[in-house]
Amino acid sequence: MWPVDFIEEKRDGKEHSAFRINRFIKEYTQGNVTDYQAAAWLMAVYLKGMNDEETAALTTAMRDSGEVVDLSPIKGITVDKHSTGGIADTTTLITAPLVAAAGVKGAKMSGRGLGFTGGTLDKLESVPGFRISLTKGEFFNQVNRIGIAVIGQSAELAPADKLLYALRDTTGTVESIPLIASSVMSKKLAGGAQAIVLDVKYGDGAFMKTRKKAEELARAMVRIGKLAGKPTTAVLTSMDAPLGMSIGNSLEIDEAVQVLSGTGGKRLTAVVLTIGAYMLKAAGKAANVEEGKAILQAHVDDGSGLKKFKDFLEAQGGDASFIGVRSLTEPVNTREIRAEKSGVVTAVDGRGLGAIAMELGAGRARKEDPIELYTGLALHKEIYDTVAEGDPLCTVYAAARTDIRPYEERIRKAFHIEAGKNVEEESVIGEVIEG
């Protein structure tokens, strides 16, 4: 009756053994379990849940379904950073060179964007000449030499997760904490880093809409990391407004340069320093978060973080000559959208702005869709900023023949401006959960 009895076991709310979970994942990956049987099991998990031991066993089985990267050729402690995704989230491109400047190695495997959330690889490919494919030898040598390398995720990394993820997306079983946690952590554990720092987003512009749900997911992932012997920290961050001031691939490269130069937006800078500080702490480079933030700020102030970013781009073939000279994003077809009244920005509809950026070509609806690397939105105001009538809110960067006018009113409506209102500012950093 295998795998029917396995499906029935979870349907009836019973606990799976690690052996049976491993067998199911192995046989599904090998094609001995059908998609409709796997879908039935996913729905049973969605409805009945999994305990910590089951979730850890599922994570391990998916990790072991493919290649587990051996980072032992890299000298020193490697710390991996992962974000659950959000709008204007350029954290990786800023944090990685900053922590590398502080002596923490970053051997990063990243993915492409889907929907309104940008992919690190797409952003990097907006830099002319940048290579996302390196041999293992090139990858290890570069990390040892400059402390950072970013490549595309191997197809051999956690293949079981790829199969299950595609099924979850089409069977209404995406929003299951055990399934999300095991999906994320199977890839992180397969990546081989010695410690993991997670940036778990919540809010309207994030996958997890409520802080409570994000906290539940964060705790589940930290528990998995602990059971796997990998020190794991989760930082909850708010996505009720765009994190950064740019939405679009080359625009986010420009924003990374701005933050590394000390002129970036408040929210993104706060998240970068916090995530980076926990990475330094995990690597033993800082005794506490306050010390870690001070170290990173010093690397911003003296320009060493920006130099590390330039070294990284050039090491992978990128033309970094624009840094300190001009913007990477050239204004081919732009329009500035200005405020029609004065007041305080009490809210910014990040999801709405993300949809506009996607329509301009900065994002993709399907993985195979092409994107326009040099389109998107550059914001001039963020939540809690004071605005005067006529102040620029946003500059639209579009392809040559795109009519920008239909987007103007939608962009203005995304900025909620209220006159004479005292707004209590919510910190972009929520709870921190350490394993």
Image: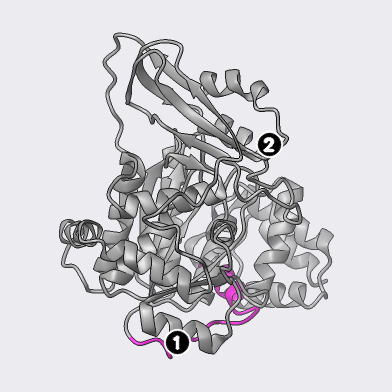
150 w.r.t. 68: above or below: above
Separation (CA) of disc 2 from disc 1: 40 Å
x then y, percent, for residue 416? 45, 18
Residue type pointed to by label 1? Asn
x then y, percent, for residue 80? 42, 69
Q: Residue at x 43, y 59 (%)?
A: 93
Is 272 placed left or right of 119 in the picture?
A: left
Q: Say which residue label 1 marks.
A: 141
Is 83 placed left or right of 179 in the picture?
A: left
* 67 part of magenta stretch: yes
Dot 2 lies on which element? helix
Q: Quadrant of residue 220?
A: bottom left
Dot 1 lies on which element? helix
Sequence-first tag of 2 and 1: 1
The residues colored magenta run 56-75
Residue type pointed to by label 2? Glu
Q: Say which residue label 2 marks.
A: 359
Classified by dominant secondary structure, the portion drawn in magenta counts as loop
Q: Residue at x 70, y 56 (%)?
A: 42
x then y, percent, for residue 137? 52, 89
Circle 1: is it few (<14), some (14-19), or many (20+) Cα within 10 Å?
Answer: some
Quick check: can you spot residue 261?
A: yes
